[in-house]
Amino acid sequence: MLTTAYNTGARVSEITALRVGDVLLERQSAMHLNGKGRKERVIPLWKNTATELRT
């Protein structure tokens, strides 16, 4: 979780609100975050972070 938070720069509320469908681990690994004011962001994940999330 710390690697994910560091990689994305997400707030704690954004991390705790994540759903499985928000994490894309296929071709290009990315994470969909909903932040303040219902802003949607798509953050690319580092290879190391994606590998840890896959396991």
Image (spheres, rainbow, N blue to C red):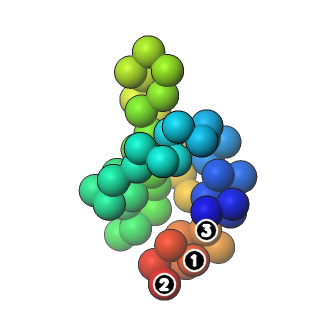
Q: Is residue 16 visible?
A: yes
Q: Is residue 28 visible?
A: no
The dot on residue 36 is none
Q: Quadrant of residue 11?
A: top right
- Name the residue rendered at 35%, 69% in the picture: 26
The dot on residue 52 is 1
- Residue 1 percent coordinates (x, y): 61, 63
Under circle 1, the secondary element is helix
Total labels: the figure holds 3
- Residue 50 percent coordinates (x, y): 53, 70
Residue that sits furthest to the bottom in the current view: 55
Cα distance in 3D space between marks 2 and 1: 5 Å
Under circle 2, the secondary element is loop
Mark 2 and 1 residues: CB-CB less than 8 Å, in contact? yes
- The amino acid type of the residue labelled 3 equals Thr
Q: Nearer the viewer, residue 33 or 12?
A: 12
Q: Which residue is mark 3?
A: 49
- Name the residue rendered at 41%, 44% in the picture: 17
Cα distance in 3D space between marks 1 and 3: 5 Å
- The amino acid type of the residue labelled 1 equals Glu
- Residue 31 percent coordinates (x, y): 45, 51
The dot on residue 55 is 2
Mark 1 and 3 residues: CB-CB less than 8 Å, in contact? yes
**Marks 3, 2: nearer the viewer:** 2
In the rendered image of this protein, does residue 29 appear above or below residue 48?
above
- Name the residue rendered at 56%, 58% in the picture: 45
Viewed as shown, does residue 13 lie left or right of 21?
right
Marks 3 and 2, the one that precedes in the sequence: 3
